[in-house]
Every structure is written in C-alpha cells, then in structure tokens.
Amino acid sequence: MGDYSLVICGHQEAPVQDTFMRWPEVKETTGLSRTTVWRLERAGGFPKRRQLGGNCVAWLESEVRGWMETRPFAERAVGHAAACAPVALSNSKPATKGARHV
C-alpha cells in the first residue's frame, strides 16, 4: 500500500493511505458479479487484482474507485417507456390441470 497526496485545485492536502479491497468489498462497492469483474479484467476494462499471497488476491481501492468514476451515465433506452408501462392484472386464475370447462 502506498501513500498518495491528494491535490485539489493546485493545493496539496494530507497524504491519502491506499488500501486493498478483498472480493466481498469489491462486489458490494461495484455491484458487479465475480464473472463480470473477471471478464472486464481480461479485456483491460477493470483494474487488475493484486496477489497478496497464496490464493489471496485484492484490488487497490483507489483503482476501483477511479474505475467507477470513468463509468458513463446511463441513458434511457428507446423502448424504455413501453417496457416500464403498467400492466393490467386479471383477477381470474388459470385453469388447473384436469379442470372441466363448462
């Protein structure tokens, strides 16, 4: 873990301590599945995990948070209004197997 200085508007602030994020924290922070993170890492679209030892890996918090800042804002899909329109529900129950219709 390294010390980094935070620079805002040309003024240097106190050093910021970078920390490692293990998988549960990465998942909670990003909302991504393990498979999605793995695919993005392979494609160069997500920070690379760091080997801490044995089978233990983690990501640098600064890199994960930096990646999050690069995510574009979501735009409405063309068919979004139609897909989210309310649907009328019927009170009738579907016929059960073997039921007689009169």
Image: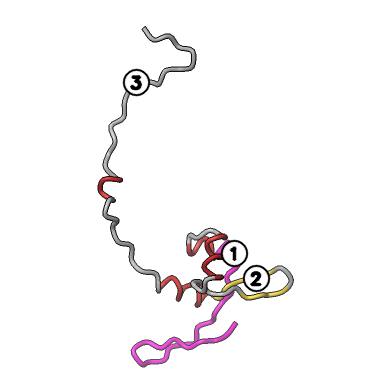
> Distance between the Cα atoms at labels 1 and 2?
8 Å
Q: Residue furthest top?
A: 102
Residue displayed at 62% across by 75% down = 50
Name the foreground residue: 66 vs 48. 48
Dot placed on the residue nearer the N-terminal end, 3 or 1: 1
Looking at the picture, does residue 89 appear above or below residue 34?
above
Dot placed on the residue nearer the N-terminal end, 3 or 2: 2
Looking at the picture, does residue 89 appear above or below residue 83?
above
Q: Secondary structure at mark 3?
A: loop
Observer-side mark, 3 or 1, equals 3
Query: Total marks drawn?
Result: 3
Residue at the spot of label 3? 92
Q: Position of residue 32 (x, y in %)?
A: 50, 60
Looking at the rendering, the stretch of residues picked out in magenta corresponds to 1-25
Name the foreground residue: 87 vs 56. 87
Residue at the spot of label 2? 57
> Distance between the Cα atoms at labels 3 and 2?
54 Å
How crowded pointer 3 is (Cα within 10 Å; few <14, some 14-19, many 20+) is rated as few
